Image (cartoon, rainbow, N blue to C red):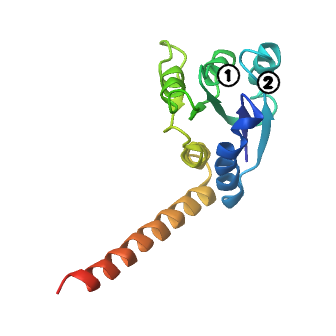
Amino acid sequence: MKKIAIVMGSDSDLPVVEKAINTLKEFDVPFEVHVYSAHRTPNEAGEFAAKARENGFGAIIAAAGMAAHLAGAMAARSTLPVVGIPVKSTNLDGMDALLSTVQMPSGMPVATVAINGAANAALLCIQMLAITDEALAAKLDEARAKGAAKVLAANKAVEEKFNV
């Protein structure tokens, strides 16, 4: 199985990124976690992205706040799928990061999840790997079924309490 790269622009992004880490662990998907900045370590970030495919990665998750150019920098140096996580900051509640991540020029796609949407970033990468991995696809189906059962149980409890 290919592994997933998780790159964050700063270790201050780790509390958000841990949701992706935990999701990948839950599905037994291998991953590596790194801190590279699009602005402070552009050479290292670019080199990592450029070698990601040959180093066994199937996709890259890039988390950054504020200017949030990391996902775009990764996409510029790799043809692997890149999933951007805009990280909420104190200034504009993450809208700056969201717009920086989602507004990519033609030819440099970055799939972008919600602000602080690390779990969905991991799930999107898992879905990409599951295209060719039936066992992983089955795990996704099982997780969705559990999620549906939880909602239906809550619905039943609410109906029993309020619907006479």
Quick one: 12 or 130, which is closer to the camera?
A: 12
Residue labelled with disc 2: 48
Residue labelled with disc 1: 74
- Residue type of the residue flagged with mark 1: Met
Callout 2 crowding tier (Cα within 10 Å): few <14, some 14–19, many ≥20: some
Kindly report the distance in space between the C-alpha atoms of the residues bearing marks 2 and 1.
8 Å
- Residue type of the residue flagged with mark 2: Phe
> In percent of the image, x 66 and y 17: which residue is there?
73
Can residue 128 be seen here? The reply is: no
Q: Residue furthest left?
A: 164
Picture quadrant of residue 53: top right
Badge 2 vs badge 1, beta-carbon distance below 8 Å = yes
Q: Secondary structure at mark 2?
A: helix
State the image coordinates of residue 21 (x, y, percent, origin top left): 70, 49
Horizontal arrangement in the rendering, residue 64 relative to residue 127 (left or right): right
Q: Residue furthest front?
A: 91
> In percent of the image, x 59 and y 44: which residue is there?
118
Q: Secondary structure at mark 1?
A: helix
State the image coordinates of residue 76 (x, y, percent, origin top left): 64, 15
